[in-house]
Image: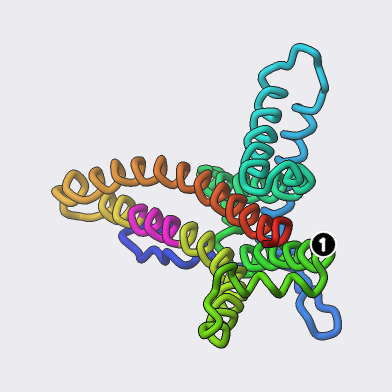
Amino acid sequence: MAQGGSKIDPMHQFLIEPVFGQNWSLFGYNIAFTNSALWMVATLVVLWLFMLGGMKGQTVPGRWQMAVESFTGFIGDMLTANIGPEGKRFLPYVFSLFMFILIANILGLLPFGLVPGVHPFTVTSHLTVTGVLAIISFALVLIVGFSRHGLHFFSLFVPHGTPWWLLWLIPVVELFSFLVRPFSLGLRLFVAMTAGHILLKVLAGFVINGLNAEAVWVAPVVAIPSFILMIGITLLELLVCAIQAYVFALLTSLYLNDAVNLH
C-alpha cells in the first residue's frame, strides 16, 4: 500500500518470497516454502473441501452436491462432444485441471489484502505454473497417442488428402504447430491473468494516490472514477477466470482427441 502519495509497484504482487523468511537449501538449490507454494496448497484444500462436500451420494442431492455434479457433468459433456464416448476416461484429469485453474484464479482476486499481513497471490500469473500444467497435458497426449497407435501416431503430421508435392512441407508445419501447443496453452493463461492483475494494481494506485493528494479536486476527478472502473474490471476478471479455465480444459480435450481419434 502507498501512503502519502508514494509509488505503487504493480509488479510487486508477482514476487515470489519465502513465507516465513526461511532460507532452506538442498544441493545448492533454494527449497524454501514460498507464497506461491502456499497458495497452491490453499487451492488444493479448497478443491478438496468442495469435492468432499459434494460427494455424499444422496438420493436427493443438496445444493452442494448439485454444484459438484453440475461441474463434473459440464466437463464430461465437453469431453464426450470433443473426443467421443472414450472421453469419459479423461474426466478425472481434465476436471481436476479445470477446477484447479478456476479456484486458483478466483483466490487471487479475493480481497485478502484487507486483512493485515495477508497478501493474495495468483499462482496462474506465473509462467512456471501454467507451463507445467501445459507440459503435463502435452505429455498425456503423447502417452495416449503412442500407446494407442504406436509409430502410426506420426501420421498426425500428414493430414488426410495432402497432395504428394507438399509432403516435404506440410509435415514440418504440422510438427511445428504440434510442438508449439504447450507453449501457447501455458502462455495464454499466464498473459490473461498477469495483464488483468497489473491493470487492477495500477487503478488501485490511482485511487490511493488520488485520495492522498493534497489538491482537493484530484479525488473526485481521478480516485472515484478509477474506483468505479476497478469494480467493473474486477467483475470482468471473474468472468475471465472462468473463461481461461474453460479454454485450458477445452484445448486439452481437443489435443486429446487428436491422440485418441487419429485418422
Q: Look at the image and tell me in which quarter the C terminus lies.
A: bottom right
Seen from the viewer's position, the closer of residues 176 and 38 is 176
Is residue 42 depicted above or below 193 in this figure?
above
Residue 71 lies in the magenta stretch: no
Q: Residues within 10 Å of mark 1 (few under 14, many from 20)?
A: some
- Side of 24 relative to 83 (left or right): right
- Side of 5 relative to 133 (left or right): left
Is residue 112 depicted above or below 163 in this figure?
above
Q: Which residues are magenta?
A: 195-204
Residue 202 lies in the magenta stretch: yes
Q: Residue farthest to the bottom?
A: 168
Amino acid, disc 1: Arg
Rendered image quadrant of residue 252: bottom right
For the question of whether residue 203 can be seen, the reply is yes
Q: Which residue is mark 1?
A: 148
For the question of whether residue 35 can be seen, the reply is no
Residue appearing at x 71%, y 75% in the figure: 154
